C-alpha cells in the first residue's frame, strides 16, 4: 500500500516543482503591472521594433517593453531584442479567417492576443512602424480600450490602450469567424467588435486624478491625433493636423513606404525623426550599433567592389591599350609635346594636322566624304530609333536591378550611392555591349564595301588611329549624363521642395 503511494507522491512533487519554476520565470519577466507591447512576425520588422524600443526608453520610461514574437522570427533576432533590454515572449500565430484579404495580413489577427496578457493590468500596444517622440506614460490612465479614430469613422489599431481580460479575449475568439472585417485584418474586426467606438469620448490626459477616480472606468475612449500621427496625411499637406511640438507618436502608415527602407528617407521628411533614433541604437551585439546588421554590412562591401571588378573585367583590354599608348607616347615625346597633343585632341577630337604625316586636309576631307557617302547607304534607317529605345530600356533595367540588389535597410546615403554605382555599371555593360555589336557590324559592313575611297580613307586615317585611344566626345557625353543623373534627384533639396503640395 505504501509502495503505491510513493510514486503518486513523487509525481505530485514533480508537478509542484514545475509550477513553481513557471511562476518564478513569470515573476522575473514581469517587473510591473503596466507595459508597452509590440508584435514581430518576421525579421523584416526587427529594426523597426529596435527603434521603437529605443524611442520609448529615450522618453525616460522604465516600464516593461514586451515583444510578442511568432515562429517566423530567427533566433538571432530574439537574442538581439533581449540584448536591447526587451522582454521576448513567444506566441503562436492566429490564423486569419478572411479568405479575401491582402497577402501581408496573413497573421495580423495575432494582435488580438494582447487582450489576453492578463499578467499586466494595462498595456499600451504600438505597431513596429511607429516611433515615440514624447512621453506617452499618460496613456495608462486611459479606459479599458482606447484607440485613435481615423477618417470615415474608422479606428486605427496601430496604437491602442488595452486592459487585458480573459473573458474579453474568449469572446473575441468566439466572434472571429462571424464578425466582418472591412480591411480583411484585425483592424476591421476591432471596428466591428467595438461597434460604438466612434461615439466614445475623447481621452483627456490632463484630467485631475480625483475627478477621474470619481467616475466609472470608461469602456472605450478615443485618442487624439497626438498619439497616432499619420505620416500619409503629412505628406499630402506638408504639415501635421496638430502642433508638431506636441506630437507623441508618429505612425508611418503610407503603404509600403516604411521608415527602415533607405529610399523612404528621400521621399518623406518625417522619416528623419526615425533615422535620428536609429543612429543612436547601442551596439547590443557585435556590429549592431546604429541599427546595422553584420551580414548586410559585409554584403554592402561586396556590392561596392563587384561593379568595380566588373568594369575592369569588361574593359581591361581597353585599359591596357590606353596604358600602353600613354607610356609609349610618354617615352617618345617630351612632356610639352604630350600636353600640346592632348590639347589638340580635346579641342578637335582627332582633328590634328595631318600635314605632319604628309597628308593634306583637303584630300582627307574628300576621302571622308566619299567614304561616308558609300557607307550611309548600308546603314538601316531604323538604327537610330532602335539605339534610342535600347538606351532607355538599358537604363530602366539597370535601375530596376540596382534597387533589387541593394539591401532595403541600409542607411539612406549608402543605399543611394550603391544604386547609382550599380545603375551606371549595369547600364555601361548592357548598352556598351549593344554599341560593341553595332561597331562590329559596321566594321564588317565597311570591310565588305571594299571601295577605293575606303582604302584612301583608312590610309589617311593612319595617324588618327594611333592616337585615338578613346573618343573624347563619348567621354564628354558620359560625364554630362552622370552629372545630370546626380543633379536631377537633388533638385528638390536645392529648391527646398519637401512635399507634393504647398502648405
Image (cartoon, helix red, strand yellow):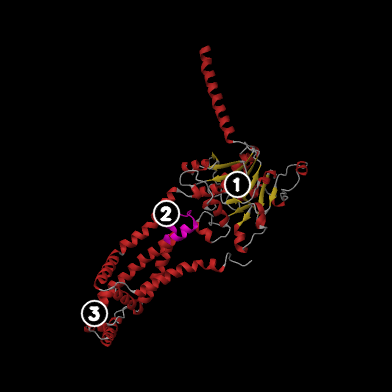
Q: Secondary structure of the magenta portion, mostly? A: helix
Write down the residue under mark 1. Answer: 56
Q: Residues within 10 Å of mark 3 (few under 14, many from 20)?
A: some
Identify the residue at horizontal 42%, vertical 54% (top origin).
300
Tell me if I can see residue 380 in this picture.
no
The magenta segment is 400-417
- Residue 413: image x %, image y %? 48, 59
- Residue 42: image x %, image y %? 50, 46
Residue 340 belongs to magenta span: no
Q: Residues within 10 Å of mark 2 (few under 14, many from 20)?
A: some
Structural distance between the alpha carbons of marks 1 and 3: 75 Å
Could you tell whether 483 is left or right of 346 in the image? right
Query: Residue 335's quadrant in the figure?
Result: bottom left
Q: Earlier in the sequence, mark 2 or mark 1?
A: 1
Q: Residues within 10 Å of mark 1 (few under 14, many from 20)?
A: many
- Residue 254: image x %, image y %? 57, 57
Residues tagged 2 and 1 counted as in contact (Cβ below 8 A): no
Foreground pick, 164 / 29: 29
Query: Which disc is residue 362 wearing?
Result: none
Query: Which disc is residue 458 wearing?
Result: 3
As drawn, 32 above or below 243: above
Structural distance between the alpha carbons of marks 2 and 3: 48 Å
Q: Residue furthest top?
A: 1
Task: Give the secondary structure at mark 2.
Answer: helix
Foreground pick, 434 / 245: 245
As drawn, 64 above or below 481: above
Amino acid at each position: 500500500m505504501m509502495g503505491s503511494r510513493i510514486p503518486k507522491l513523487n509525481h505530485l512533487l514533480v508537478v509542484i516543482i514545475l509550477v513553481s519554476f513557471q511562476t518564478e520565470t513569470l515573476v522575473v519577466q514581469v517587473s510591473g503591472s503596466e507595459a508597452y507591447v509590440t508584435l514581430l512576425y518576421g525579421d523584416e520588422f526587427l529594426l523597426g521594433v529596435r527603434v521603437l524600443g529605443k524611442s520609448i526608453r529615450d522618453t525616460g520610461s522604465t516600464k516593461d517593453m514586451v515583444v510578442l514574437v511568432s515562429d517566423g522570427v530567427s533566433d538571432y533576432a530574439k537574442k538581439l531584442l533581449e540584448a536591447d533590454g526587451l522582454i521576448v515572449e513567444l506566441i503562436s500565430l492566429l490564423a486569419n479567417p478572411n479568405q479575401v484579404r491582402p497577402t501581408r495580413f496573413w497573421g495580423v489577427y495575432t494582435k488580438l492576443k494582447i487582450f489576453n496578457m492578463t499578467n499586466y493590468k494595462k498595456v499600451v500596444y504600438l505597431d513596429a512602424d511607429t516611433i515615440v517622440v514624447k512621453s506617452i506614460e499618460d496613456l495608462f490612465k486611459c479606459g479599458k480600450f482606447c484607440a485613435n479614430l481615423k477618417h470615415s469613422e474608422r479606428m486605427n489599431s496601430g496604437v491602442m490602450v488595452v486592459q487585458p481580460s480573459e473573458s474579453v479575449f474568449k469572446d473575441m475568439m468566439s466572434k472571429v469567424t462571424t464578425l466582418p472585417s472591412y480591411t480583411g485584418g484585425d483592424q476591421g474586426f476591432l471596428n466591428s467588435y467595438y461597434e460604438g467606438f466612434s461615439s466614445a469620448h475623447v481621452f483627456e490626459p490632463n484630467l485631475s486624478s480625483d475627478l477621474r477616480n470619481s467616475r466609472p472606468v470608461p469602456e472605450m475612449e478615443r485618442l487624439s491625433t497626438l498619439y497616432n500621427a499619420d505620416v500619409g496625411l503629412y505628406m499630402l499637406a506638408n504639415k501635421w493636423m496638430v502642433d508638431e511640438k506636441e506630437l507623441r507618436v508618429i505612425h508611418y502608415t503610407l503603404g509600403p513606404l516604411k521608415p527602415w527602407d533607405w529610399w523612404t528617407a528621400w521621399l518623406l521628411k518625417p522619416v528623419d525623426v526615425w533615422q535620428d533614433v536609429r543612429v543612436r541604437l547601442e551596439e547590443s551585439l557585435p556590429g549592431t550599433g546604429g541599427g546595422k546588421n553584420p551580414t548586410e554590412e559585409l554584403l554592402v562591401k561586396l556590392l561596392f567592389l563587384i561593379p568595380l571588378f566588373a568594369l575592369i573585367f569588361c574593359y581591361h583590354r581597353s585599359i591596357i591599350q590606353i596604358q600602353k599608348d600613354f607610356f609609349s607616347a610618354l617615352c617618345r615625346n617630351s612632356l610639352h609635346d604630350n600636353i600640346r597633343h592632348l590639347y589638340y585632341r580635346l579641342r578637335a577630337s582627332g582633328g590634328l594636322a595631318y600635314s605632319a604625316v604628309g597628308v593634306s586636309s583637303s584630300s582627307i576631307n574628300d576621302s571622308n566624304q566619299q567614304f561616308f557617302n558609300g557607307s550611309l547607304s548600308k546603314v538601316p534607317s531604323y538604327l537610330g530609333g532602335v539605339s534610342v529605345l535600347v538606351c532607355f530600356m538599358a537604363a530602366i533595367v539597370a535601375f530596376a536591378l540596382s534597387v533589387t540588389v541593394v539591401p532595403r535597410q541600409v542607411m539612406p546615403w549608402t543605399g543611394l550611392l550603391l544604386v547609382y554605382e550599380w545603375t551606371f555599371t549595369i547600364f555601361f555593360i548592357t548598352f556598351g555591349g549593344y554599341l560593341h555589336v553595332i561597331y562590329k557590324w559596321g566594321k564588317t559592313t565597311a570591310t565588305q564595301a571594299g571601295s577605293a575611297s575606303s582604302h584612301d580613307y583608312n590610309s589617311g586615317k593612319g595617324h588618327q588611329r594611333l592616337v585615338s585611344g578613346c573618343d573624347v566626345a563619348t567621354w564628354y557625353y558620359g560625364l554630362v549624363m552622370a552629372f545630370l543623373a546626380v543633379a536631377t534627384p537633388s533638385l528638390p533639396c536645392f529648391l527646398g521642395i519637401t512635399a507634393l503640395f504647398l502648405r
